[in-house]
Amino acid sequence: MPVDAPKNKPVCLTINNVSFSYGAEPVLENISLVIRQEEFVGIAGPNGSGKTTLLKILVGLLSPATGTVEFTCHMDDCAGMSPCRPCIGYVPQQPVLRQQQFPVTVREVIEMGTYGQSGIFTRPTAEDRISVEKAIAEAGLGRVAEELFSDLSGGQQQRVLIARALVGNPHILALDEPTNGVDAKSKQEFYSLLTHMHDKHKITVLIILHDLTELSQMMERIVFLHHRILYDGPAQSLGSRGLWDLMVKAGNQ
Amino acid sequence: MVLEFLMYNFGIRAFIGGLIVAVTCASLGVFIVLRRLSLISDGLGHVAFGGIALGFWSGIYPLYTAIASVLAGSVGIHALSRLRVASDAAIAILFSAGLALGVVLISMAQSAPADLLSYLFGTILGINDSDVYLAAGLGVIVLAVLVLLWKEWIGITLDPDFARVAGMPVTALEILFTVLVGLTVVVATRLVGILLVSSLMVIPAIAALQLRQPFRRTILAAIAIAIVSVIIGLQLSFSFNIASGGAIVLVTICFFILTVIVSRVLPRIKKELPVDEWNHQCTELGFQESNESKEPETEKN
């Protein structure tokens, strides 16, 4: 880290003038972004700045009030779909799965990642089972595959959620504050896994983070949001000091 | 004699009807409890009461009006949630509306129908062949939908947002799930009564969840607890001439207490015993204790 910038890569995701509001309160105003294939993008901003809302619009959980989201890479996989389901792997901020003690094993959680590929009324195929095994092995979860998800540490749970998001071979991985409440060692393991997945599978990574040091050190590009885009550019030229200044500026607005 | 009620036709009918209801209620119950909708069966039970009263008042077979009312109630709960009424508040409104409608319609009759009490408290030992056929028909439908959409139920239960991103029609599935619960409530009402139907749905599930097993095993454990509770409850009812619905539910509560003890006490014994002795005791009891080392645990958050 930081990951090399793929400037010559094709555009994968185009966000055109997206606006969204909860009631009368505008959350996003005319957001436009172009994300290229294999980019590693950190989305930053103060609480309530619209980061999670933007990610939810990208993955199709919310519809924008105005504007469009277009997936323009791997078009063969996306025919007729908006959002492009096979395109997206999603790791939510605080899934219900992490809040409750569900009687579900690591393997059963990762199997959920195959659901988007198969239609309704279908059973997992042999191919799905192979994908699950591969994801378990790649995320280093072999020894805990039959353990209950709720028995794992926070860091291990995040690895399981990443494996679940990647089991369907997505082209874009969207993560919402994945290192929240995770200790330093687990954070390190998490970033190693993410970098490995990014390098090996050539996926585009969009990640919301709060930690300014992590953002400046781990990301290649930063989009700083406070209802509008205040900064969109290389992380290195901004640094944690520059990010801090943006936080102060957003706080004063 | 054990299971002496099986010597009589009414006992055999009760046994078959009880098994169908036990399997259906317990399977749905695990999803209900995990989705934190434990009161939904109670709410739909009271909606069914309104439907049954409507049947008595209008002269239509009460179970048919009960089915129609729970279908309307299932859609009503989701319609209210779209109006930003919280799900527990939506259930409370349906609960009150069903009960109030039932009371008003019964008060309009000259006298309370004699059969009404059987719907309130259940008469599993008094069910007829057509009740068993209806229970079997609805039970098969509910279980078939449950099995066919297995991964969809797992998805909307464990992580609805992830299920949406995966392209599942989450809202339609939630409505269908409520309809399945409603149909099961109607079937179970005739057997254990409106007032106890939610107990048969959620208590075996809560008891099974105490055992902290993987998903499929938890559902099988809930079904086993419900079946054994029905059998023991029926025998107690037959032997001591007590209300069968109440006896069945009390047995499920005994199972809940038992599973709480097992799940709390066994890990403590395991902690206190040296590893070798624990493994030896497991082998003696016929259990195989996994010695596979876990990945080193980082600080639990």
Image: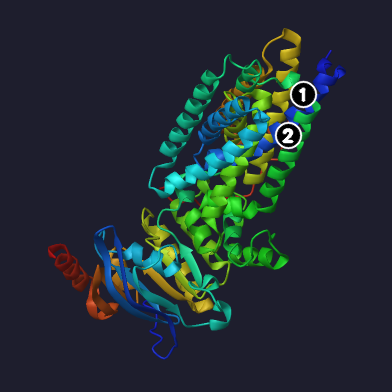
Q: Which residue is mark 2?
A: B135
- Lower sequence index among marks 1 and 2: 1
The percent position of residue A247, horizontal first and vertical second, equals 19, 66
Task: Give A77 or A143, whichever is nearer the viewer.
Answer: A77
- Identify residue type, mark 2: Ala
Chain name for mark 1:
B
Question: Is residue B295 at least partly visible in the picture?
Answer: no
Residue A202 visible? The answer is: yes
x, y (%) of residue B282?
A: 69, 34
Residue B243 found in image quarter: top right
Q: Residue furthest left?
A: A252
Along the line of sight, which residue is nearer the eye, A66 or B235? Answer: A66
As drawn, B183 above or below A124: above
Question: What chain letter is assigned to the residue under label 2?
Answer: B
Residue B134 placed where, x, y %? 74, 35
Distance of label 1 from label 2 (alpha carbons): 11 Å
**Residue A249 higher or lower than B299, as above or below:** below
In which quadrant is the C terminus of chain A drawn? bottom left
Query: Relative to residue A88, is residue A223 drawn left or right?
Result: left
Q: Residue furthest bottom?
A: A8
The answer to whether A80 appears left or right of B224 in the picture is: left
Q: Position of residue B26 (x, y in %)?
A: 65, 35
